[in-house]
Amino acid sequence: MKPNSITSRTHGKLAQSSILLPMLILMGAIASCGAVPTSKDMMNESLVAQQGMVPAAAPLPPSDAVANEVGRAQGMVGEVAQGSGEIPQAVPQLIKTASMTMEVEAIEEQIAAVNQIIKQKQGDLLQFEDNKPRAQNMRHVVSIQLRVPQQQLENTINAIAELGTVINRSITAEDVSAQLIDNDARLKNLRKQEEMVLKIMERSGSVGDVLNAARELGTIREQIERLDAVQANLRTQVAYSTLYLNLESPVSAAELPQKSVGKELQKTWGNATEALGDVTVGLLKITLYLLAFSPFILLVAGGAFLGYNRIKPSKPDESSINHHS
């Protein structure tokens, strides 16, 4: 190979390397500028950090401490789920009311049986009303209001249902859980107010301030007493359910009124006889009144007759007037 060709190739490679090197440096600078945040980007990141916002396109990764806490919490939830199988829930506070109407034989005996069942279920008799029939075709009805523990309500109904034939039966429930929770929160708040007013009264101050504090304390305690009474009543209604029971005796076919021709005629004859008696009594009363007032009637009649006779001759006779004419 000739020396001139070697020299020309060497100069060509040097020229290419001299061109590529500045280009590589320029590309690296551009890349480094893209990786390094600008002042504008830093300002945006600071604003995001101050406002508590994270861009949706680039969420911030959690730190190791946060990740550890999240993992620990998930582990605890997993252990609870494995141990209980479900998340515990609050028991609803229900006020249950039941009603039942039955047809029973020998109603007096069944009343005693109902009282025995109530004693066994640890219940109470609140009201008793016995409506005995006034006629043969009327039912003997007994109304009873009972109170039993809520856990024994269905057992009590089933036990009483065996005494006769159930005509209708119903159970209603009212959830008062929210009302109880709300009243408890109000009581807690009122008791805190009571403590604050007591602390104010303990401090030395004017008589007017003490009187105002005492007046406010009385109002707060009155509200506390009312809410305590409401809560006690609600919890009693939740613990004990009310049962309205109606016992009815059956009406047999023999007791139903039988209509016949003979009875209708007999009833009509009785009505006619009664009417005749009323007319007879009325005529007799009129006769007795006439007899009692007969002297006065005779005097009046006699006076009228004498007056008429005196007035009659004083009038001129028509025949004599015609004769003179």
Image (cartoon, rainbow, N blue to C red):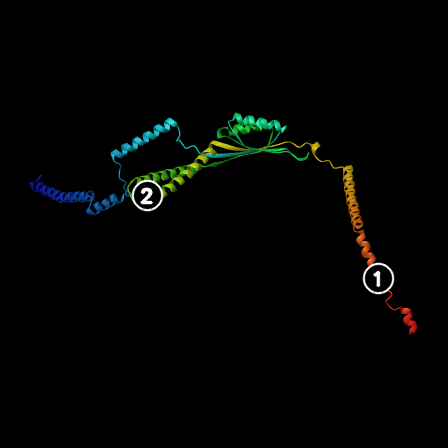
Left/right placement of residue 95 relative to residue 36 reads right
Q: Find numbered disc 2 in the image and state the secondary structure of the residue it sits on.
A: helix
Which residue is outermost to the left? 3
Instruction: Give the answer, above or below, for where 284 lies relative to 261.
Output: below
Residue at figure coordinates x 71%, y 32% from the top left: 254
**What percent of the width, then of the height, locates residue 111?**
59, 28
Q: At 23% from the left edge and 44% from the top edge, which residue is drawn?
A: 46
Closer-to-camera residue (240/35):
240
Give the amino acid at mark 2.
Answer: Val
In the rendered image, residue 165, in percent from the top left (x then y), is placed at 61, 30
Question: Quick check: 118 above or below 54?
Answer: above
Vertical comparison of 167 with 313: above or below: above
Q: In the rendered image, which quarter contains the N terminus?
A: top left
Mark 2 to mark 1: distance in Å? Answer: 107 Å
Q: Earlier in the sequence, mark 2 or mark 1?
A: 2
For mark 2, what is the residue? Answer: 210
Which residue is disc 1 drawn over? 308
Pointer 2 local density, CA inside 10 Å: few below 14, some 14–19, many at least 20? some
**Could you say which is closer to the camera, residue 243 or residue 207?**
207
Q: Position of residue 155 (x, y in %)?
A: 52, 27
